[in-house]
Amino acid sequence: MSLIRSAELSATPYASSEMLGSKKHQMMYVSESYSGEDYDPKYFIDSPSEDTINPSSYGVSRNLYHTRGSSINTENPFSTSESELMDGQSLDCVECDEDKMRLKLQELERALLDDGGDEEEDDMYVDGQWVDQVQITSHDSPKASSSSDSNLSSISTNREVSQPPSRTPKQLLFDCATAISEGNVREASIIIDKVRQIVSIQGDPPQRIAAYMVEGLAARMGASGKFLYKALKCKEPPSSDRLAAMQILFEVCPCFRFGFMAANGAIIEAFKGEKRVHIVDFDINQGSQYITLIQTLATLPGQPPHLRLTGVDDPESVQRPVGGLKHIGQRLVKLAEALNVPFKFRAVASRTPLVTPAMLDPQPREALVVNFAFQLHHMPDESVSTINERDQLLRMVKSLNPKLITVVEQNMNTNTAPFLARFGEAYSYYSAVFDSLDATLPRESQDRINVERQCLARDIINIVACEGEERIERYEVAGKWRARMMMAGFTSCPMSESVTESIINLIRQYSERYKIKDDMGALHFGWEDKSLIVASAWR
């Protein structure tokens, strides 16, 4: 409410003395006693304008008095009925009333400014929040400064700011990811420091995943994700702890293990009636899947078929520093000999995109099976390059006319999703994985720490920190893989009931929280309601 409107109320018989003696006043001279239709929001939330605050030698209040007071001579401050009564009064009475009006205004000014008393401080409510307290002083006040700057409001820095409730590591992570996406590097750095102080790789699952994901965010800010990922995965020889962790992951996290088992079950069924079988694998890893396959073949009735296994060896793969596929092949040959399973191993030293049909040496009398277990997501697709190595590889395999193709992949979208959506997807996925590890390994288990640090951390960092060709871990959801396989000319080959039932019986030995579901011929393995691994077969 303006000072003029205050004067109007004080000059009328309807204005109470409480209006002049308000205990507290709001910024822009709004008295708390005024409310309802007399409330003028303009002077409550707007910033001071030249009409309301104009520093001069007379002070803020004097200038406002003269600026607004001049309009009294041109605007009738009374109601219509009161003006009619004044028409009959003499000029002397009018002049007398003007003198009374001036006195009333001066009394109102002293009351509002509390001239001669202690100044009171009030907060000002602007844009939905309370801002710093403002203290208004008059030039006549003994506390006013002699400087012209003292005519302006003095800002109090002693206001107590209410602190918001502490945020969880998850909330801080998403705050940080949002800040990074908006280019707010300073805020993101502050949040990263906060998260690092409250998380631990030995804490509960939310703390542990936060400990690794915050490093991914830090690597993204420092553009060091590519180098950190390569250090974790490729450039440095894997230690015995790393190799042991990879094996433990497949054993203690059933979803990964069951993915291999589902693929093996489909492969063994394809062996029926075949004397010679050729399996091509573009990522054998440590050969764990084929150790189980050979052991299963040895237990089947009758003579097992002759098995030839071709492994493609990426020159920068994790296996090369410890002997590469040649060393893994030797172990598999010895195992097959001990179990009387006819077996031959052949390694192809080449990067996957450069593999040609001739390099795989297909034979006409062999049933060809191609296994893609946790490998296809490493191939860049059309979102990375127009070459689209992912679909190109599938079309090349289709040209070989295989009897069966098996695909095992992690069920999440870290391929085409933008950064924030990808961050949320990764958090949801790995939260379930970390939670499932708690159900199989004690909190203080060194094996659990090794699995998470050696196997899962590198994927998290690459997903969060890297973009473009540097982002290698490009997972897709089951529906997208299905579309890709069909576009390449493959048809779905549903898993048999015997394979599904055997895996269900094994799942029960771990935890009831592990789930299995058959969806459109593919087997989904998950933790509670979160699908983690999908295994499918195609022909």
Image (cartoon, rainbow, N blue to C red):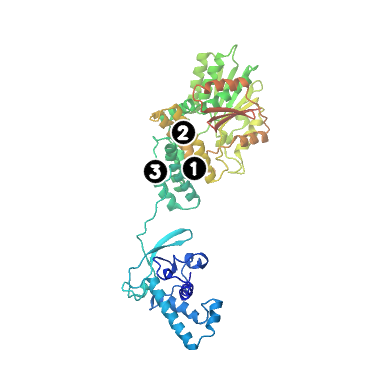
Q: Give the foreground label among 3 and 1.
A: 3
Q: How many marks?
A: 3
Give the image quarter of residue 480: top right
Front residue of 210/152: it is 152
Residue that numbered label 3 is attached to: 196
N-terminal-most mark, 1 or 2: 2
Q: CA distance from mark 3 to mark 1?
A: 17 Å
Residue that numbered label 1 is attached to: 464
Q: Is residue 395 above or below residue 118?
A: above
Q: Within 10 angstroms of label 3, few (less than 14), some, or many (20 or more) residues?
A: some
* Residue shown at the point (49%, 42%) measured from the top left: 464
Q: Residue furthest top?
A: 302
Residue that numbered label 2 is attached to: 434
Q: CA distance from mark 2 to mark 3?
A: 18 Å
N-terminal-most mark, 2 or 3: 3
* Proximity of marks 1 and 2: CB atoms separated by less than 8 Å: no
Q: Amino acid at mark 3?
A: Arg
Residue 341 appears anywhere in the view: no
- Can you give x and y, in whole percent of width and height, for residue 152 in the image? 39, 71
- Can you give x and y, in whole percent of width and height, for residue 197 in the image? 37, 43
Give the image quarter of residue 367: top right
N-terminal-most mark, 3 or 1: 3
Name the side, left or right, on which 103 lies relative to 291. Answer: left
Q: Amino acid at mark 2?
A: Phe
Q: Secondary structure at mark 2?
A: helix
